[in-house]
Image: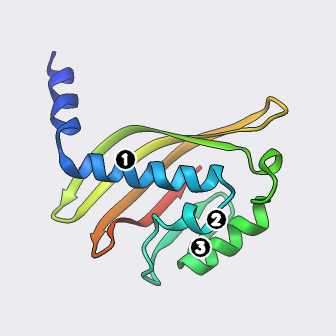
Amino acid sequence: MLFLLGLVAVAQQPEVTAIDAAMARSVAGWNAGAVDRFLDVYSEAPETSFVEGEGLVRGKAAMKQRYEAKYNFSDPAKRGALTIERLDYRPLGPGYALYIGRYTLRYPDGHSASGPTSVVFHHEAGGWKIIADHSS
């Protein structure tokens, strides 16, 4: 019962709703083949970081280059269909939050890729933006 009460408390926090909406817009951008819409959830700050198996990438422009080199955004069969499931949410202080999720890319040929993602959000003038992303 305490677990359920904790879920209700998280679900009622307005920042959770706003962050879920930001993630949904990002996923919709991916699925539409619009890399800029997908990346809109990331902060423009030059120190914004993305860490994955190939290493550390800093800045939104470098992230865009990485995604365009790794995925063919004009071909849904090569890009895959993205979903993200929120597994955890924690406020980290005023204007900051941790979002832990599981991403899944499903391809038309039946194979998929899935893994955990941990992102730190910061509330900026343009809304909630990712300042650090670690995906495996």
Mark closer to the chain start, 1 or 3? 1
Residue 49: which numbered mark, if any?
none
Q: Nearer the viewer, mark 1 or mark 3?
A: 1
Pick whichever, 36 or 91, lies toward us: 36
**Residues under numbered marks 2 and 3 in contact, where contact means CB atoms less than 8 Å apart:** no
User: Which residue is located at x 59 percent, y 49 percent?
Assistant: 136
Query: To which residue does mark 3 refer?
Result: 57
- Reading the chain from its start, which is encountered first: label 2 or label 3? 2
- Looking at the picture, does residue 98 appear above or below residue 7? below
Marks 2,1: beta carbons within 8 A: no
The three-letter amino acid code for the residue at tag 2 is Val
In the rendered image, which residue does mark 2 sit on? 35
Identity of the amino acid at label 1? Asp
Residue 13 % position (x, y): 18, 45
Q: Residues within 10 Å of mark 3 (few under 14, many from 20)?
A: some
* Separation (CA) of disc 2 from disc 1: 19 Å
Specify whether 88 is left or right of 31.
Answer: left
Dot 1: what SS?
A: helix
Identity of the residue furthest to the top in this view: 1
Q: Secondary structure at mark 2?
A: helix
2 or 3: mark nearer the eye: 2
C-alpha separation, residue under disc 2 versus residue under disc 3: 16 Å
Which residue corresponds to the image point at 21% horizontal and 23% vertical from the top-left?
3
Give the Cα separation between the discs numbered 1 and 3: 24 Å
Tag on residue 20?
Answer: 1
Instruction: Looking at the image, tell me whether mark 2 or mark 1 is earlier in sequence order.
Output: 1
- Quarter of the image where one finds residue 41: bottom left
Quadrant where the image shows the N terminus: top left
Where in the figure is residue 103, as x and y percent of width and height? 56, 42
